[in-house]
Image (cartoon, rainbow, N blue to C red):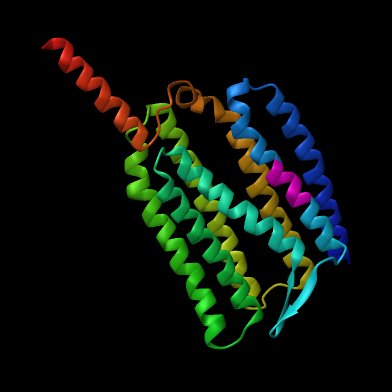
Amino acid sequence: MIEPSTVRFASAAIYAVSAVVLVALARRKPAELRRYCYPFVAVVALAGVGVAGWGAGIGTFSVASGTLEGGQLLTDYVAYPFLFGFATFVAGVSRRYVGGVVAVTVAMRLGYDFAEVFEGPLATAGTAGILVGYATLVALFFGPVASAAARQPPARELFYKKTRNLSLFAFGVLIAWAMLQIAGLFDQFTATVTLEYLDLLLRVGFAGFVFANVETLAAEAESGVGGDGGNVSRDAGATRSASSAD
């Protein structure tokens, strides 16, 4: 049977190639849009470094009754909050909402670590944190964040909906995987292959999706409209119009 380390090294190679391709694609975008692209390149490149370190056994340490992998922690605690934060940003909401979504995502990832290495009440609390956190994200994304997106141009609102649906679906699948893993239903090889596949889809697939639709943000980059700032700009314009009419 193929060793888990071999799977992770192969995954790291895919991340490396993907990062190079994404850099080339980003350089073909207009200068004002590259600032949205390069963070995704960094996330993919960092994932390659983390997975390679994980495959080499670097950064493994024991906690309670389990072990944590430094490479996995590095990539997950960067990628997941960033992806959900970006989806929130596309809606044009205030920084408070973006920060709240990032905090909930971090708490969910921390809940997985608790469920993985602890037993008894702490493990139960970790599992509950994952489920409650996901329900909170769904409520935010279909509630106030969606309302803010509805005030954006139609193309950007559609971009938000696609980004939201992709991130929630992908993370929902990851949560299902985590529940099965915690329950001990995967052997080591199956757990490794399925996790690497899901993580590649979430990181590289999400980046490719954003690159294909990043022009949607061009209007925001040119006009400075976004979230509360957009409302202020519209109010100011209405005030000037009223003054001219007087």
In the picture shown, does residue 156 fall above or below 141?
Answer: above
Image quarter of residue 175? bottom right
Residue at point 57%, 81% (across, down): 123
Residue at point 50%, 41% (across, down): 163
Please identify the dominant SS of the magenta region: helix
Compared across the picture, whether 28 is left or right of 146 comes to right
Quadrant of the drawing holding the N terminus: bottom right
Q: Which residue lies furthest to the bottom in this view?
A: 120
> Would residue 43 be counted in the magenta stretch?
yes
Q: Percent x, y for residue 74?
A: 71, 59
Q: Percent x, y for residue 136?
A: 41, 61
Residue at point 80%, 52% (across, down): 49
Q: Percent x, y for residue 181?
A: 65, 72
Q: How many numbered discs sit on the rendered protein?
A: 0
In the picture shown, does residue 172 fall above or below 124?
Answer: above
Q: Which residue occupies the foreground of this view, 63 or 146?
A: 63
Image quarter of residue 206? top right
Residue at point 65%, 42% (across, down): 205
Q: Residue furthest left?
A: 246
**Range shown magenta:** 42-48
Q: Which residue occupies the foreground of this view, 205 or 123?
A: 123
Compared across the picture, whether 25 is left or right of 58 comes to left
Q: Which residue occupies the foreground of this view, 158 or 96?
A: 96
In the picture shown, does residue 232 fall above or below 178?
Answer: above
Quadrant of the drawing holding the C terminus: top left
> Would residue 69 be counted in the magenta stretch?
no
Compared across the picture, whether 41 is left or right of 88 comes to right
